[in-house]
Amino acid sequence: MSTISRPPNDVLDAAVDGRELRTAVAAYLSRFKGLSRTHADSDLRAYLNWCSERRLHPLAASRPHVELYVRWMQEVRRLKPSTTSRRVSIVAGFYRTAVIDGLLEHSPAEHVRRPHVPAESPRSG
């Protein structure tokens, strides 16, 4: 498979890129089972929707795009650090799998900083 470095420009490119994206998503989610797969699917879908709203092809994203996604989760959605960190982990895993499968040369999430999550749960019990 070829390395994707640009968003699709025409109908044919969109069909090929769409197929590669679906394959990349399926390859990543196949690593999970049961409830973990359901949660990973939900977290990855949140990122893919964020990309779609910005007309950004996920396989053409760069590190600043992933950083903007993190800031959006923190500042716009006001998600808790644990949720943001978990979602960034899913995005990083997705891109790591895309690198392993030869779709990307490097992961745009490789050096993205995750929010600090306290070691102890704030819940009692």
Image (cartoon, rainbow, N blue to C red):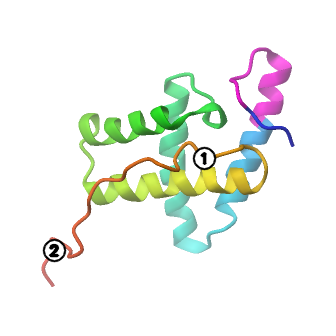
Residue to which mark 2 is pinned: 123
Residue to which mark 1 is pinned: 107
In the visual, does 119 lie left or right of 2? left
Q: Quadrant of the N terminus?
A: top right
Q: Residue furthest top?
A: 10
Question: CB under 8 Å between callouts 1 and 2?
Answer: no
Is 95 drawn above or below residue 32 in the view shown?
above
In the visual, does 86 lie left or right of 95? left
Q: Is residue 9 magenta?
A: yes
At x 43% / y 53%, what residue is drawn?
87
Residue 57 % position (x, y): 63, 29
Distance from label 1 to label 2 (Cα)? 34 Å
Q: Residue furthest left?
A: 124
At x 76% / y 44%, what residue is drawn?
103
The residue stretch that appears in magenta: 5-18
Q: Secondary structure at mark 1?
A: loop
Q: Quadrant of the C terminus?
A: bottom left
Q: Nearer the viewer, mark 1 or mark 2?
A: 1
Amino acid marked by disc 2: Arg
Q: Secondary structure at mark 2?
A: loop
At x 56% / y 42%, what residue is drawn?
108
Is 102 drawn above or below residue 5 in the view shown?
below
